[in-house]
Image: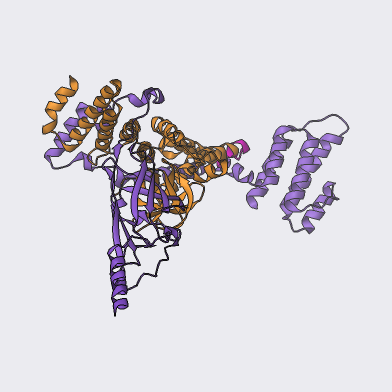
Chain colours: A purple, B orange
Amino acid sequence: LVSFVMQWITLIALMGEPGALGPGESPGANAPGSPPIVGQPVDFSGAVGGPFVVQWIAAPTELTTEQPLTLTLRITGPGNLAAMPRPALGKLDSFRSFAVEDLDDRFVPGDPPRREFRYRLRPRSVAVTEIPRFKFVYFNPRIAPPSRGYQTTYADPVALTVNPRSSPLPADVPAWMLEPPTTDELFGPPRPLWRRGLDRLLAVIGVDTDELAPESGRWFAAVAVVIVPPLGCVAWLLVWRRRHPDAARLAAGRRSRAAAAALRAFARSPDAEAVASALIEYLRDRHGLPPLATTPGEIVNKLTTGGCPAPLATTAAELLRRCDAVRFGPAPATDPALAADAAKAVLDWEAAA
Amino acid sequence: VNFAWLLLLVPGQTAAVQDGVAAQLAFSRGMLLRADGRAHDAAAAFRRAAERLESDSLPPSAAVCYRAGNAWFLAGDLPRAIAAYRRGLGLDPTDVDVRSAFAYARGQVQYPPAEELSRLLRPEREFWAAWPTLHSAGGYAFASYVAGCLALTVWRMSRRRWLLVAGLVFLAITAVPAVGSGIQWRNARRDAAEPVVVIIRDVPLRVGNGADYPSKHDLPRGCEARRMFERGGWVQIETGGGAIGWVPADAVVMSVRET
């Protein structure tokens, strides 16, 4: 009975001193028990052991908005500090005024051991005055019953002085940037007198000229700008054709590439040899004259058998005979109308085609 | 003295006049404080001027955006200055003042020194100069269009080849600003669908919409990107080089006015 009572007294004494360690018992050798699920706080840090001391170390404490500071969360005490996960400061409501970025962490064995988590914080506004208090929940397995083993401790807040970002140095700012805004830039140039008078007159009948924005007519104007020039040109072309039918016929004749080449040749060189050459070339390109047909007789035969109208073949042969007469006649002769007649014949054929 | 007279007249004026005059006063005060070496107070004054210049009451114009950008820059807020200049270029892409100020502000952004990473984060390059558009060269384009139509008509009458060539050349000249306007219209549509945002603080570009997701790159303050989606207080963005990721919504400022 005495032995049983002494055991109870010893146990109660141990429970009364939750952080006390036995003689020769090192803090690192403190074997933590597993924390119970029932009654576990939602913000349990995962640390088992204790008691723990938690503190912030921040540098610098005077800074400007968005300037980074390095924040170290130091947790000191016996327990499973080497295995505990990193507290997620970025998810805490109290740290919403900071941009939080995780840095490295380290475990320092010793007496007592400690764990340090480093963060990079950026205060988002000048309204930030401190690094807020940090709540740290751990489980102490020496406290019985286990459901009461969850303990809470806090890291004290750290005062911060956050200044607004300073403006650039004068030397860094170009001169045009220092010009103040002018009234014309802000409100537009003043309306001329006639426009103001018109506005007043229209206002009498209930028309606000500011609301007569060109938006509604813009598409109409764009379509008109695109369509009107070609329409005008087409109208001009039709009128011109009606008034100048010969010129129109000439233009139509030039539509054929072979005819255009022949007409250019007639205009360029009116001598008989060039006219004959250009005429034969035209007949070959346009009417399928075979290359072997060179004399007027052969040309008439080949064109007629090739399906060409007889008047065309006859006219062509006649023109070629006139060319031969000029070229091979006994006495030097000229035929000033030869080129013009050839051109007329080509245009007639093109018109008939 | 002029400003004092304006101040007396302000209470009876419209909101636009009140904001405009207040902006002018704040800017002038910022200049005085700056000259006195009171940088923080000057920055606060310039910030007030910029906020007034960006108020809805003032009619939007490239000139107002230019002045607002200058005020933001002098207040030390480079990202908002870039956003303001960008807004001004949206209103008038040919404004030389806004364009040069925009280039100057962009040059102040500190991108990472690594060339490959810098190329990934830098803004999109513009492959078409601002001036050849119908907005800026509409008169010349119309004259060239008319000349082309006339040349082709006369060619039709005479079949002279040089007229055909001249007509086609004129139409090709007309096509240059027309293509420029088409590109500008396409860019405007893209800006409306995926507006450009400016990063207002150095922030990691994360793989997902949460602080737990790993970081891909560190975005510098002033970096421009396109906003693709927004979810749960996080914004998905795409940088000019094509890097896609998430940043907190409060880490960006829009370059277009949200209605």
Q: Foreground residue, A112 or A159?
A: A112
Q: Hey, which residue is sitting farthest right in the picture?
A: A330
Q: Where is residue A114 in the image (x, y as percent from the top left)?
A: 42, 53
Q: Where is residue B171 in the image (x, y as percent from the top left)?
A: 52, 40
Q: In the rendered structure, does residue A102 fall within the stretch colored magenta?
A: no
* Vertical placement of residue A83 versus B196, above or below: below
Q: In which quarter of the image is residue A273?
A: top right
Q: Hey, which residue is sitting farthest bottom in the picture?
A: A1
Q: Position of residue A2 (x, y in %)?
A: 29, 77
Say whether residue B58 is visible: yes
* Residue drawn at the location 60% of the way across and 42% of the way down: A251
Q: Hey, which residue is sitting farthest front in the picture?
A: A2
Say whether residue B254 is visible: no
* Residue drawn at the location 54% of the way across and 44% of the way down: B117
* Vertical placement of residue A185 versus A27, above or below: above
* Vertical placement of residue A246 versus A180, above or below: below
* Vertical placement of residue A35 versus B97, above or below: below
Q: Foreground residue, A106 or B18?
A: A106
Q: Give the range drawn in magenta.
A: B156-164
